[in-house]
C-alpha cells in the first residue's frame, strides 16, 4: 500500500516508530508486527546511525542496542523484506548511511534503489534539510518513493516554501523544539504549526512527545491527519529488555499501547465531528 | 579568504548544512549575523573583538625563534606562541569572538562542547568576561583525563555536564551539545570549538582564528626577512591549523603541514568500530557528520568509528571541511604522528626550550623530529597550547613507556618514604 492510499481514508493515521533490530533482529520483527496488530497505519522504521544528534536518551539507547545486536543497512533491508506487515514502511535515518551506501560513486541513488526493491515507501532523513535534499529527491522520483520533511516550530516561512516544493507522502510536524522523547504534556506549538501549513496538499502527521491515547486525541482534534509515536513505544521495548521479559509479553504490551494510541486518535475525529 | 568563498559555505564538495530542521532557523540567523558583524564589521563588532582580544586575551602573541630546536634540526624554527594567549591555548580567539557575537545577536545563554577542556575553559572565561551564563558538555573519558580544565571551567562559573554515551569523548560531546541547542534554540548560542559543524561555523571559526597567521606572517617577515618555507600545526578539528594557515594559503611557496594524531596505529578495526587514531585527513573518507560533509573515520556502512589519541583535543572522528578540501586540492599536506612520538616531543620541548606544550601541540613537534627534512630552511610551528592540563596524563602515559627523554619521577617516592619515616619517628 502507498502512503497516499493510507491518508486517503477518512481516519487519522497512527504512525508508530521503532528502531529496527532493537534489542535483537528476531525480537524486533515480532515487535513491528505487533504494532500492525495494534492498529498501525504506517510504520516509521528506524535504521540506526551511530551519531543520532536529534534523538533523546530513549531512542539513543534503542539505537545503541540495535547496533550492538548487529544491525547494518544490509540487515535492515533484509528485515524489511522479512517482516510480515502489510502497512507501508517508511525508513527513518541519517544521511551518512544513505550517502555511504553508494560506495565509491557516493550519493543516495543506490540506497534508494535497494529500498524500493525491498518495498520501502518513503524516507525521513533527520539531518537532511530541504536545501541539501535535491539528490535524494531525484532518486526518490526515479524509483517512486516519497520524501517526507520535518517542519519544526522554529521553521521560517521561507523554509516552509522550500519544503513544500520538495515534500511528498506526508509532512512530519515536529510538535515542539528539542529532541525526541515522551513528555507529559502536548505542546500548543502544534496547533500553530498546523495552522501555518493548513493549505498544503500533503497530509500532516504530528510527532515528538506524544505518549498517551489522550495526547493522540488532542493532536487529531488540533487538525492532524496522523499521529507519530516513538519514545513511548521504545520505552516498552527497553523495559522488556531490561526486565528479561519474554518477547511475546513485550509484543503484547506494544500491541496494547498501539491500540490505545490508535483509539485515542480515532476519538479525536469523533470529537471534531461532534463539536461541529 | 572569506571574500572569494561561495556564500553557501561549501569548500569544493565539502561543507554544507546537514542539521535537523529545528536548528536551521538558528543557523540562518547565525549566517546573517556572521555576514553583518564579522564580515562587514557592523556596529564596530570586529573593532570591539580586536580590542578585547588585545586587552583580555593578550594579543598580539609573540613569534619566537626556538634556538635549541633550530640547532637540532639545522633549520630555522620559529614558534607562534598561542600557548601565551589567555587561557593557555588558541581557543580563546574563537570563543571570545563567538560569545561576543552571541551578545550582539541578543542571545542569553552559551553552550559549548569540549574535548581537551581548552575550548570549554576559553568559552567559560569569555562568558564570565562578557557576563553570559554558560554550560559545557564534556565526555566522561575526557573529564577524567583533563581534570585541571574541569576545575577551571567550574571556577569560572560554568556548568559542566558530563556526557556518558559512547566512548565519552569529543564526538559524543558535540552530539549532546547539538541536542541542547535543538531544545533551547531560541535564546541559546552554541559556541562550537573548531572549524567543524554546519556553515557558517567552519568559515566563522576560521576567521576568528586567522589572527594567528595574520600576525605570524608579519612577524616572520620582520624577524627573518621573508616568508617561511613551511607552517606546521596539529589538527584535531583543525581550528589552530586553519588559523595558522589562513593567511599563507595564497602564498603557494609556503608548505602547509597538518599533523594529525596517528594514535597507536593507522589500521582500523572494522568489527569493533574502532580506529586507533584520529587521522581523518590521512585515512578517512567522505561522509556527513555533525552538520557537514567532510572526511571521516567511518566503517564501510557509514557508521562513525570511535577515534583514539593520547591527546583529548585531537581525539575526533571528523575534521573541518575546509581542511578536507585543501588536502584534496593538494594545498595542505596531511601527515601524522603517533602517541609515542608525541609524548617524546612533549618532553623534548619542555627540556630544550622551556615550553611545556599541550599534548595536541606536541604532535606538531613530533613531526619535526621525525621529518626535519620536510619543513625547509625556515618553518613556523604553531604552539597551539600549553600543557599544564596534560601533566597527569603525561606522567601516567610516560610511566607505561620506555622513553629516552622522559624525566625520572622517583622524587615522589623519596618524599613519600621520608614522610612516612618522620611520622613514624614522632610516634
Ligand atoms: C592546545 C590544543 N591544540 C589543538 C587542539 C585541537 O583543536 P583544533 O584542531 O581545532 O585546533 C586542541 C583542542 O582541544 C587544543 O586544546
Image: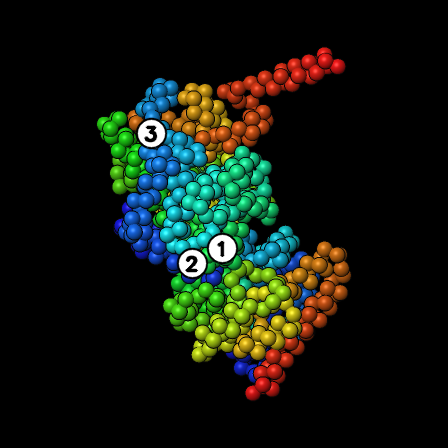
Left or right: A47 in relation to B59: right
Residue drawn 61% across the image and 76% down it: A217
**Whether residue A267 is situated above or below residue B102 in the rendered picture:** below
Residue drawn 55% across the image and 31% down it: B393
Left or right: A251 in relation to B341: right
Q: Earlier in the sequence, mark 2 or mark 1?
A: 2
**Whether residue B347 is situated above or below residue A191 in the rendered picture:** above
Q: Earlier in the sequence, mark 3 or mark 2?
A: 2
Ligand 1 located in image quadrant: top left
Residue at the outermost front position: B131
Query: Of residues A266 and A272, which is closer to you in this image?
Result: A272
Q: Chain of mark 3?
A: B
- Distance (Cα) linking label 3 and label 2: 37 Å
Look at the numbered disc 1 and give the secondary structure of its residue.
helix
Check contact, mark 2 vs mark 1: CB within 8 A: yes
**Whether residue B340 is situated above or below residue A122 in the rendered picture:** above
- Distance (Cα) linking label 2 and label 1: 9 Å
Left or right: B374 in relation to B142: left
Number of callouts: 3
Q: Chain of mark 1?
A: B
Q: Which residue is mark 1?
A: B181
- Distance (Cα) linking label 1 and label 3: 37 Å
Q: Which mark is residue B62?
A: 3
Residue drawn 26% across the image and 26% down it: B223
Question: Are labels 3 and 2 on one chain?
Answer: yes
Check contact, mark 3 vs mark 2: CB within 8 A: no
Percent across and percent down for residue B65 are 33, 24
Q: Which residue is mark 2?
A: B26
Residue at the outermost top position: B425
**Whether residue A226 is situated above or below residue B392 in the rendered picture:** below
Amino acid at each position: 500500500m502507498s502512503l497516499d492510499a493510507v491518508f486517503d481514508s477518512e481516519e487519522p493515521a497512527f504512525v508508530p516508530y521503532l528502531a529496527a533490530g532493537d534489542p535483537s533482529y528476531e525480537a524486533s520483527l515480532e515487535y513491528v508486527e505487533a504494532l500492525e496488530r495494534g492498529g498501525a497505519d504506517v510504520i516509521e522504521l528506524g535504521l540506526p546511525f551511530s551519531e543520532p544528534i536529534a534523538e533523546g536518551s530513549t531512542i539513543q539507547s534503542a539505537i545503541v542496542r540495535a547496533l550492538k545486536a548487529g544491525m547494518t543497512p544490509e540487515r535492515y533491508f533484509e528485515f524489511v523484506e522479512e517482516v510480515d506487515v502489510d502497512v507501508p514502511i517508511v525508513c527513518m535515518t541519517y544521511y551518512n548511511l544513505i550517502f555511504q551506501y553508494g560506495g565509491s560513486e557516493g550519493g543516495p541513488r543506490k540506497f534508494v534503489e535497494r529500498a524500493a526493491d525491498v518495498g520501502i515507501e518513503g524516507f525521513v532523513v533527520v539531518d537532511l534539510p530541504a536545501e541539501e535534499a535535491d539528490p535524494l529527491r531525484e532518486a526518490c522520483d526515479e524509483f517512486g518513493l516519497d520524501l517526507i520533511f520535518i517542519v519544526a516550530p522554529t521553521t521560517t516561512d521561507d523554509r516552509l516554501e522550500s519544503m513544500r516544493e520538495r515534500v511528498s507522502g506526508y509532512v512530519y510536524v515536529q510538535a515542539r523544539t528539542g529532541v525526541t522523547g515522551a513528555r507529559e504534556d502536548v505542546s500548543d506549538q502544534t496547533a500553530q504549526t498546523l495552522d501555518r501549513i493548513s493549505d498544503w496538499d500533503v497530509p500532516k502527521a504530528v510527532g515528538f512527545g506524544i505518549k498517551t491515547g489522550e495526547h493522540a486525541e488532542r493532536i487529531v482534534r488540533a487538525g492532524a491527519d496522523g499521529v507519530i509515536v516513538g519514545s513511548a513505544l521504545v520505552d516498552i521495548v527497553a523495559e522488556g529488555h531490561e526486565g528479561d521479559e519474554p518477547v511475546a509479553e513485550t509484543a503484547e504490551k506494544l500491541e496494547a499501547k498501539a491500540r490505545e494510541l490508535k483509539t485515542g486518535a480515532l476519538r479525536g475525529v469523533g470529537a471534531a465531528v461532534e463539536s461541529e | 579568504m572569506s571574500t572569494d568563498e561561495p556564500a553557501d559555505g561549501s569548500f569544493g564538495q565539502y561543507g554544507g548544512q546537514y542539521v535537523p530542521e529545528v536548528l536551521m532557523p538558528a543557523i540562518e540567523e547565525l549566517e546573517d549575523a556572521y555576514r553583518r558583524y564579522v564580515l562587514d564589521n557592523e556596529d564596530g563588532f570586529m573593532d570591539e573583538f580586536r580590542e578585547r582580544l588585545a586587552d583580555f586575551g593578550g594579543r598580539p602573541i609573540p613569534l619566537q625563534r626556538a634556538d635549541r630546536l633550530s640547532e637540532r634540526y639545522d633549520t630555522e624554527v620559529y614558534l607562534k606562541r598561542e600557548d601565551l594567549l589567555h587561557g593557555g591555548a588558541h581557543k580563546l580567539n574563537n570563543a571570545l569572538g563567538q560569545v561576543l557575537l552571541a551578545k550582539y545577536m541578543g542571545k542569553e545563554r552559551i553552550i559549548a562542547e569540549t574535548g581537551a577542556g581548552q575550548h570549554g575553559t576559553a568559552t567559560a572565561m569569555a562568558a564570565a568576561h562578557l557576563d553570559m551564563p554558560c554550560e559545557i558538555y564534556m565526555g566522561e573519558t575526557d573529564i577524567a583525563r583533563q581534570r585541571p580544565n574541569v576545575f577551571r571551567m567550574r571556577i569560572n562559573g560554568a556548568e559542566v555536564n558530563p556526557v556518558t554515551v559512547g566512548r565519552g569523548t569529543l564526538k559524543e560531546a558535540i552530539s549532546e551539545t547539538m541536542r541542547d541547542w535543538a531544545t533551547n534554540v531560541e535564546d541559546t548560542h552554541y559556541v562550537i570549538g573548531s572549524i567543524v559543524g554546519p556553515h557558517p561555523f567552519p568559515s566563522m571559526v576560521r576567521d576568528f582564528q586567522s589572527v594567528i597567521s595574520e600576525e605570524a606572517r608579519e612577524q616572520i617577515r620582520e624577524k627573518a626577512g621573508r616568508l617561511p618555507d613551511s607552517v606546521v600545526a596539529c589538527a584535531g578539528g583543525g581550528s589552530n591549523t586553519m588559523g595558522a594557515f589562513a593567511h599563507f594559503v595564497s602564498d603557494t611557496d609556503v608548505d602547509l603541514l597538518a599533523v594529525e594524531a596517528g594514535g597507536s596505529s593507522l589500521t582500523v578495526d572494522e568489527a569493533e568500530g574502532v580506529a586507533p587514531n584520529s587521522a581523518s585527513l590521512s585515512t578517512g573518507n567522505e561522509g556527513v557528520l555533525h552538520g557537514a560533509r567532510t572526511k571521516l573515520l567511518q566503517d564501510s556502512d557509514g557508521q562513525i568509528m570511535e577515534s583514539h589519541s593520547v591527546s583529548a583535543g585531537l581525539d575526533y572522528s571528523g575534521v573541518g571541511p575546509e581542511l578536507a578540501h585543501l588536502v584534496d586540492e593538494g594545498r595542505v599536506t596531511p601527515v601524522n604522528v603517533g602517541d609515542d612520538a608525541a609524548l617524546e616531543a612533549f618532553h623534548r620541548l619542555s627540556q630544550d626550550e622551556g615550553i611545556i606544550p599541550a599534548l595536541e601541540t606536541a604532535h606538531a613537534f613530533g613531526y619535526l623530529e621525525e621529518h626535519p627534512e620536510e619543513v625547509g630552511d625556515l618553518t613556523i610551528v604553531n604552539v597551539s597550547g600549553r600543557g599544564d592540563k596534560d601533566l597527569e596524563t603525561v606522567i601516567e602515559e610516560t610511566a607505561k613507556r620506555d622513553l629516552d627523554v622522559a624525566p625520572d619521577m622517583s622524587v615522589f617516592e623519596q618524599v613519600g618514604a621520608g614522610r612516612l619515616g618522620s611520622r613514624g619517628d614522632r610516634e
